[in-house]
Amino acid sequence: MLVESITNEAANDGIDKVTEAVRRAMRDVLRPTEDRLAKLMAKAAVAAATAMYMNVQTIADLGKHNAVEIYNEARVKAVAYLKERDDNE
């Protein structure tokens, strides 16, 4: 019974070490992709914010006095759109 217990414990320790090694390897492989995606998301956020403020300025330059109201309505619609589920999800 003691030998069996030691064997099971050794097997579990081995599994833990293999699991840790696999996780470390996966982390090392995925890190560059995660970093690249984070940079792309940051660029997309800057581009979106730039476009948003340019649109508000363009609306104001066209003589609309309610540019901020138009922006707020568009933002509400955008949030509703983002909350919608696609058929593919």
Image: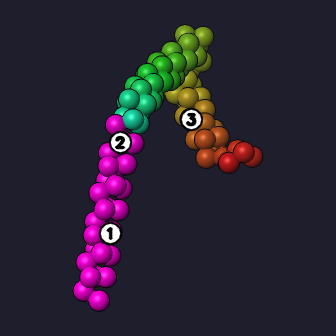
Residue 71 counted in the magenta span: no
Residue 10 counted in the magenta span: yes
50 above or below 70? above
Tags 2 and 3 touching, CB below 8 Å = no
Quarter of the figure that contains the N terminus: bottom left
Helix, strand or loop at label 2? It is helix
Residue under numbered circle 2: 25
Task: State the residue in front, 57 or 51.
Answer: 51
Task: State the residue in front, 27 or 3.
Answer: 3
Circle nearer the viewer, 1 or 3: 1
Magenta segment main secondary structure: helix
Amino acid tagged 3: Arg
Amino acid tagged 2: Ala
Q: Which of marks 1 and 2 is nearer the N terminus?
A: 1
| Figure coloring | rainbow
What is the distance, in whole Å, between disc 1 and disc 3 at their CAs?
53 Å
Q: Which of marks 1 and 3 is nearer the N terminus?
A: 1
Amino acid tagged 1: Asn
Mark 3: give few (<14), some (14-19) or many (20+) Cα within 10 Å: few
Residue at (30% x, 75% y) in the render = 7
Circle nearer the viewer, 1 or 2: 1
Task: State the residue in front, 4 or 73.
Answer: 4
Q: Residue 12: which numbered mark, if any?
A: 1
Region of the chain picked out in magenta, as a range? 1-28
Q: Earlier in the sequence, mark 2 or mark 3?
A: 2
Q: Where is residue 18 in the image (x, y as percent from the top left)?
A: 34, 55
Residue under numbered circle 3: 75
68 above or below 51? below
Mark 1: give few (<14), some (14-19) or many (20+) Cα within 10 Å: few
Residue at (55% x, 29% y) in the render = 71
Circle nearer the viewer, 2 or 3: 2
